Image (cartoon, rainbow, N blue to C red):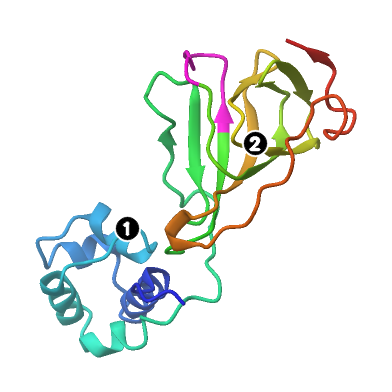
Amino acid sequence: MNSTPNLADLGRRVRAARLARRLTLEEVVSRTDFTVSWLSKIENGLLAPSLEGLVRLAEVLECGVDDLVAGLSAAPRFVVARRGENPKKSARNGRSGMIAEPLADAWQRRAMEPVMLHISGTGNRKSPDHHDGERFLHVIDGDLKIIYGDELIVLAAGDSIYLDASLPHALFPSGRGEARVLSVSFEPGRNGDAGRPTRSRVSGKGNAKSAARGKA
């Protein structure tokens, strides 16, 4: 079981206490040394406040610290990622041409890594991605080109692929526009997970259905 604080629940409690007192983010931070960004991250379960910050926050919200933290060591049953609330960050570097939108950062010690990838034709991805375990990709919008080992796999909107992530692979938009892709990765041993044997590698010719339309 996860023994780390449940930041998602803490965030929901802070937001509920603020809204119950009809306070905006700006009104709360005006009474403290906090910033809107800091408080927003707390409410979205993306940041663990210091004890001093938590005490000050409880004072402003006119509630007890216990009201905010009681039972937070219990593992969450679920976390919700609201559209537009997830921080986006460039993958690897600002010139990668790929923006990653994490979808489950509020779940501590998760075994899977779900992200929404926004892949453009700009940038230069010299280092293909690879890690132990498995990866699932589902194309939401646009067309995706995958260089998987020595194979070229092209996926259209609605297509998906499940692959052995230990083989180096790189993602590019197939057309001129951006490709939006749901990516879910599993890495054995991540965050103490005991792991399990990985399946055989996916071939772009056979196991990737009819998505493989050529070779590199």
- Residue shown at the point (84%, 27%) measured from the top left: 211
- For disc 1, the neighbor class at 10 Å (few under 14, some 14 to 19, many from 20) is some
Query: Element at badge 1?
Result: helix
**Predominant SS along the magenta part:** loop
Quadrant for residue 39, please give it: bottom left
The answer to whether the residue labelled 2 contacts the one labelled 1, judged by CB atoms less than 8 Å apart, is no
| Mark 2: amino acid | Val
Q: Quadrant of the C terminus?
A: top right
Classify residue 26 by image quadrant.
bottom left
Q: Is residue 59 above or below residue 43?
A: below
Numbered mark located on residue 181 in the image:
2
- Which region shows up in magenta? 118-127
Q: Nearer the viewer, residue 110 or 118?
A: 110
Going from the N terminus, do you reach mark 2 or mark 1 first?
Answer: 1
Q: Is residue 140 left or right of residue 55?
A: right
Task: Judge whether residue 72 can be spotted in this image.
Answer: yes
Q: Secondary structure at mark 2?
A: strand
Q: CA distance from mark 2 to mark 1?
A: 25 Å
Q: Position of residue 108 (x, y in %)?
A: 42, 64
Of badges 2 and 1, nearer the viewer stands 2
- 2 and 154: which is toward the camera: 2
Judge whether residue 122 is colored magenta. Answer: yes
- Of the pair 193 and 101, the residue shown nearer to us: 193
Is any atom of residue 63 visible in this view?
no
Residue at the limit of the structure toward the front, as seen here? 197
Residue 61 position, x and y percent, is 23, 79
For residue 148, which quarter of the picture? top right
Classify residue 150 as left or right of residue 124. right
Q: Residues within 10 Å of mark 2 (few under 14, many from 20)?
A: many
Against 149, residue 85 (above or below) is below
Q: What residue is disc 1 on?
A: 41
The x, y position of residue 70, in whole percent, is 32, 88
